[in-house]
Structures are given as structure tokens and as C-alpha cells.
Amino acid sequence: MNTDQVNPAPKKVDQAEELKTEGPISEKDEVKAAERKTAKLHKKAARSAKGGK
């Protein structure tokens, strides 16, 4: 039995969002997306620095 068909690997949210966008996006939207991604990474780093979950 092939387990890849039963349980496909979950895609990252960023990959899914990239697939949704069709056509060129504005520079302003790119900046907003980068800021959101940076904020998420900072939150994650802060949690791990505290030893939190």
C-alpha cells in the first residue's frame, strides 16, 4: 500500500497562498506580505527564546 496516496504531505501555508495568486501583484502587496511573514518569524523567535511553545 502506498502511504503517499493515503496521507499526502501537508503544504505550508505560504506555498498555498502563492498558488492562489494569479497574475502580477502590486509592489504594495508584496511589501505587506513580506511584513506579515517577518512578523510571524519574529513572534516564533520570541516564543522559542522564552522557551514557550
Image (cartoon, rainbow, N blue to C red):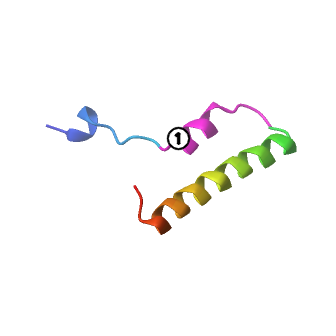
Secondary element at tag 1 = helix
Q: Residue furthest right?
A: 27
Q: Position of residue 51 (x, y in %)?
A: 41, 65
Quadrant of the frame with the N terminus:
top left
Quadrant of the frame with the C terminus:
bottom left
Q: Is residue 50 left or right of residue 15?
A: left
- Above or below — where is 7 with respect to 36? above
Give me the residue at 73% from left, 51% from top: 35
Give me the residue at 27% from left, 40% from top: 4
Give me the residue at 55% from left, 37% from top: 16
Q: Quadrant of residue 38?
A: bottom right
Q: Quadrant of residue 42?
A: bottom right
Q: Position of residue 7 (x, y in %)?
A: 27, 36
Question: Which segment is the magenta one?
Answer: 12-24
Asked if residue 3 lies in the magenta stretch, the reply is no
**Kind of residue indicated by mark 1:** Val
- Above or below — where is 33 with respect to 48? above
Q: Position of residue 8 (x, y in %)?
A: 32, 38
Asked if residue 14 lies in the magenta stretch, the reply is yes
Q: Is residue 10 left or right of residue 31?
A: left
Q: Residue furthest left?
A: 1
Name the residue tied to disc 1.
Answer: 13
Work out whether residue 23 or residue 42 is closer to the camera in this orientation and state it: 42
